[in-house]
Image (cartoon, grey):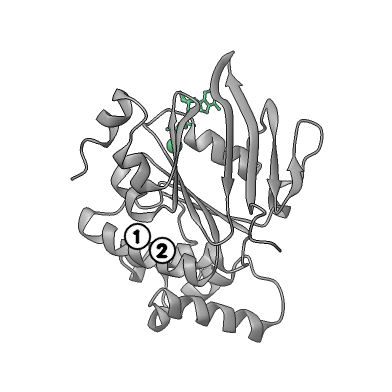
Amino acid sequence: MSKSVPRLEIRNLRRAFDGRPVVDDVSLRVMPGSVTCLLGPSGCGKSTTLRMIAGVEMQDTGEIYVDGKLICDTVFRIPPERRHIGLMFQDFALFPHLSVADNVAFGLKGAREEKRARVEELLREVGLARFIDSFPHELSGGEQQRVALSRALAPRPRIMLMDEPFSGLDNRLRDEIRDLTLDVLKQEDAAVLLVTHEPEEAMRMADEIALMRAGRIVQQGAPYNIYNAPVDKEAVAFFSDIN
Ligand code: ADP
Ligand code: MG
């Protein structure tokens, strides 16, 4: 597949609730092997956008493409479980009654040995090989998060959607997990759409930032460019709490 075909493309996506537009003509591309951050204040429509891409919320109008192929418009719709999309949310809990190995293997099909090999590979990548037979309650919050990342990546999703995945973690841990997550995502060559309301997180993790406000994308580009040439006063204010 040519590098110039976006892994994920959404075109003119719209969604209103009770007549109020929440996602208002959003278009966006995520290239293979890259991290795009959808960045904006709480309530601007980020999660709704992600939910439409995942297929758990239906758009009013607009199209979604994966590797150049239409997966959803207003008449045609591939169901969520066939979209090859990995999901990670803030409170995406592990199954408490399953071991770490079984949690990571949960979405995997195929022979037992193959599944085990994939689980071992991922747990090595996130630095948790020694916990393979542990249970979630034996792990710290940060370690559980790393298991959740492994679980989401196990079936080699074409796209990873991450909705504020680090906001439940304390500050000290967060930077470390952001860096580790980036390493693993690059190693797995995932195309990532990461939602956050924290400019600092977007600056740290994104190859590309899409700045969203009141349902619309108001600016899009490389983090450095967005930070150095904010589109308007509101964008300046939004970025002002980073040093
Ligand atoms: P964000 O993730 O950027 O914080 P959301 O996409 O969660 O924003 O929500 C955007 C707006 O849409 C909010 O005002 C929210 O209350 C509203 N909203 C989201 N889902 C629904 C729903 N199912 N019904 C009605 N309003 C909703
Ligand atoms: Mg949200």
Q: Residue at x 34, y 25 (%)?
A: 232
Q: Residue at x 38, y 55 (%)?
A: 205
Frontmost residue, 96 versus 120:
120
- What residue does disc 1 label? 178
Where is residue 195? Give x, y as percent.
Answer: 44, 44
Q: Which residue sits furthest left?
A: 243
Q: Is residue 224 above or below residue 215?
A: below
Where is residue 124? Give x, y as percent.
Answer: 44, 80
Q: Is residue 140 above or below residue 238?
A: below
Frontmost residue, 59 versus 4:
4
Where is residue 118? Give x, y as percent.
Answer: 58, 79
Mark 1 and 2 residues: CB-CB less than 8 Å, in contact? yes
Q: Which residue sits furthest top?
A: 19
Disc sitting over residue 182 in the figure: 2
* Residue 96 visible in the picture: no
Image quarter hosting the N terminus: bottom right
Frontmost residue, 157 versus 227:
227
Image quarter hosting the C terminus: top left
Where is residue 23? Give x, y as percent.
Answer: 55, 27
Frontmost residue, 19 versus 92:
19
Quarter of the image for residue 184 reads bottom left
